[in-house]
Amino acid sequence: MKRFYEAVDVEAADNGIQITLDGRGIKTALGNAQVLPTKALSDAMAKEWDAQGEEIDPALFLYRDLADFAIDMIAPDRDATITKLLSFIETDTLCYRADPDEAFYARQCEMWDPLLEELESQTDIKLERISGIMHRPQSPEMHIKLTDRLNNFDDFALASTLTMASLAASLSVALLANAADADANALWSAANLEEDWQIEQWGQDHEAEDVRKRRTADFLNAFEFGRLAAASA
């Protein structure tokens, strides 16, 4: 698609900020007004529109799909998103460990226990750690507390958190990524501990390496989107 606009601006809108192209507000994929929550996010997305050349390159839009997802999909049914997020805690990567007599178990405890303890202190919950592959449900009380926490997230934070949880196969990682002092790269490394362990044992697969790079970029992009969407003026 050829570039169809000249001027990119950021303007105040009802309940937020909207990017305009030649004075017309941008719409989401489903035709809703793409109203953004912070100036930081709107400025970053406006730069992406402004950076386009004569041909529109979708790869330059790092945040557009997440913004549209928040507006088109999450806002109409927040409960469905929260239910989906809670499903990740039942199979959370950081909660499922090797058997204690395996060498990998010590590595898992070393990297994962401090993260889970941090989340537990933030949310006043206790997460089950499970050795082996047999499922063990988390407590109903834990679900209630996490539901309350997620209900306090706005639609854009939920979009970021769901994306990170899906990529990390871990709600705990995604929730920790919302902390003001979160280290996104360290959290992503924790989520990929098993893969990295396998690489140490058997070597790198180039095709898997390419997939890892794409998933890493997607995780870091969702993390930054969440930061921009929560940034104060």
Image: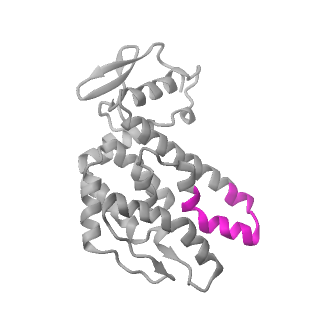
Residue lying farthest bottom?
A: 101
Report the residue at 59% width, 21% height from top. Answer: 53
Vertical position of residue 63 compared to residue 203: above or below: above
Give the colour scheme shown: one colour
Q: Nearer the viewer, residue 90 or 70?
A: 90
Decide whether residue 198 is among the magenta residues.
yes
Report the residue at 40% width, 65% height from top. Answer: 88
Residue lying farthest right?
A: 203
Residue 46: percent from left, percent from top: 45, 24
Which quadrant of the structure image shows residue 13?
top left
**In this rendering, position of residue 206 left or right of residue 226:** right
What's drawn in magenta, residue-wise? 189-209
Residue 211: percent from left, percent from top: 63, 55
Report the residue at 57% width, 50% height from top. Answer: 185
Vertical position of residue 116 compared to residue 34: above or below: below
Which quadrant of the structure image shows residue 75?
top left
Image quadrant where one finds the C terminus: top left
Residue 42: percent from left, percent from top: 40, 27
The main secondary structure of the magenta stretch is helix
**In this rendering, position of residue 21 left or right of residue 109:** left
Q: Nearer the viewer, residue 7 or 170?
A: 170
Report the residue at 48% width, 48% height from top. Answer: 182
Q: Nearer the viewer, residue 153 or 101?
A: 101
Decide whether residue 160 is among the magenta residues.
no
Residue 166: percent from left, percent from top: 46, 58
Vertical position of residue 201 compared to residue 69: above or below: below
